[in-house]
């Protein structure tokens, strides 16, 4: 997936971000930084850039995984230096990484960024299809028995067999 198509020109970003961006975003959109540089981050960028509630201003990733100076036409900076480039009071974060190490990376970066004063967004597309889960579980119950009941109630854990 290529994320450079449709990205704001560098001159426009440079003009808006330093001083005038805060007043503009209060009227238009909330500044957002995406944590990640892989396919999940590109997918998040593709979806969130179409949401007028947010203005994506850049990316952050651990210094060891920094792919360069920009991603999708926006600056990408080391997570270790995020405050210098995107102050916590000015932006929100969206952590967009896949299930690396059983979500440990996502959880660790969330805690670290929260301790630094960052706020986060949780995103569900306005185009997502919502399904009434109870109707599905009722229909599944007749076919799956205990498995459907376990799914409905959350009544199974690690290593617990489902008959």
Image (spheres, grey):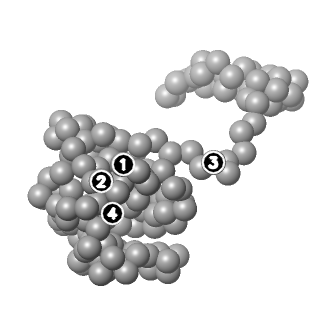
Instruction: Name the element at disc 4.
Output: strand
Judging by the rendered image, the residue that carries numbered circle 3 is: 126
At horizontal 67% and vertical 51% (from top left) the residue drawn is 127
**Residue 4, position as x, y percentages in the image:** 44, 79
Q: Nearer the viewer, mark 1 or mark 3?
A: 1
As drawn, 157 above or below 77: above
- 57 left or right, relative to 99: left
Judging by the rendered image, the residue that carries numbered circle 4 is: 57
Residue 34 appears in the picture as rendered: no
Whichever of labels 4 and 3 marks the residue nearer the N terminus, that label is: 4
Whichever of labels 1 and 3 marks the residue nearer the N terminus, that label is: 1
At horizontal 33% and vertical 76% (from top left) the residue drawn is 12
The residue closer to the viewer here, 161 or 34, is 34
Gap between marks 2 and 3 measured at Cα: 26 Å
Q: Nearer the viewer, mark 2 or mark 3?
A: 2
**Label annotation for residue 74:** none
At horizontal 63% and vertical 48% (from top left) the residue drawn is 126
Instruction: Name the element at disc 1.
Output: helix
């Amino acid at each position: 997936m290529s994320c450079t198509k449709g990205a704001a020109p560098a001159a426009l970003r440079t003009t808006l971000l330093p001083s005038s961006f805060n007043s503009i975003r209060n009227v238009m959109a909330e500044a957002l930084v995406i944590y990640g540089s892989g396919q999940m981050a590109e997918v998040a960028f593709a979806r969130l850039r179409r949401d007028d509630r947010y203005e994506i201003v850049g990316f952050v990733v651990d210094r060891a995984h920094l792919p360069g100076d920009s991603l999708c036409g926006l600056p990408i900076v080391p997570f270790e230096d995020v405050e210098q480039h995107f102050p916590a009071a000015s932006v929100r974060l969206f952590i967009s990484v896949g299930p690396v190490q059983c979500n440990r990376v996502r959880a660790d970066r969330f805690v670290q960024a929260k301790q630094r004063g960052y706020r986060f967004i949780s995103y569900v597309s306005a185009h997502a299809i919502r399904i009434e889960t109870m109707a599905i579980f009722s229909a599944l119950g007749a076919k799956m028995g205990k498995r459907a009941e376990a799914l409905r109630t959350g009544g199974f854990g690690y290593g617990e067999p489902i008959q």
